[in-house]
Image (cartoon, helix red, strand yellow):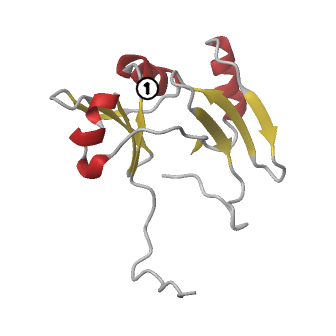
Amino acid sequence: MNAIEPAATQPAGLFEMTLEVADLAASERFYHDVIGLPIAARWRDERPAVWLALGREGFLGLWPAETGGAAAIHGGRGGRHVHFALRVPMGTLDAVRARLDALGYPTEDRDFGNGNRAIYLDDPDGNVLELTERATLWNGAPAMDSE
């Protein structure tokens, strides 16, 4: 078995993630109007897409099937996601859940203990979105609210 050499540079964080969506306008409404992600950019040319800000330096891309595949850089294509998580500031999860409930989005709650809680809901394409408050990270280090 060959040993894998350590990376010369450790990645600084997630820059972007893209979801393939069936209805770009419906997905934009969900992530912008319901979840509250600000719109960072819109592509209106032959590859329509919407980019939403995740904090200061991360982005969620939404695009229809025709924007991916052969038209995409390196053949980027859609796929079925199990789920992905977005952190919300500590102390806000109950208000987020109440708002989603009022808008008719059913949520599932989980309490992982030690101040780590989450709610789960489906986006318009059936991707599972987790919204989580974190007191600690996976490695046990304290989580810090982003600036």
Q: Which image quadrant: the N terminus?
A: bottom right
Residue receiving disc 1: 32
Q: Is 6 drawn above or below residue 21 in the view shown?
A: below
Q: Residue 44: x percent and y percent?
A: 19, 26
Q: Residue 38: x percent and y percent?
A: 39, 32
Q: Residue 25: x percent and y percent?
A: 36, 18
Q: Return the residue nearer the eye: 134 or 14.
A: 14
Q: Return the residue nearer the eye: 139 or 123.
A: 123
Residue 20 makes an appearance in the image: yes
Q: Residue 99: x percent and y percent?
A: 64, 19
Query: How busy is the neighbourhood of tag 1: few (under 14 within 10 Å), some, or many (20 plus)?
Result: some
Q: Report the residue that reaches farthest toward the left.
A: 45
With 123 as the anchor, is 136 left or right in this view?
Answer: right
Q: Is 27 drawn above or below residue 133 in the view shown?
A: above
Please name the amino acid that badge 1 sits on. Answer: His
With 34 as the anchor, is 108 left or right in this view?
Answer: right
Quarter where residue 11 is shown: bottom left
Q: How many marks?
A: 1
Q: Residue at x 67, y 60 (%)?
A: 137
SS assignment at label 1 = helix
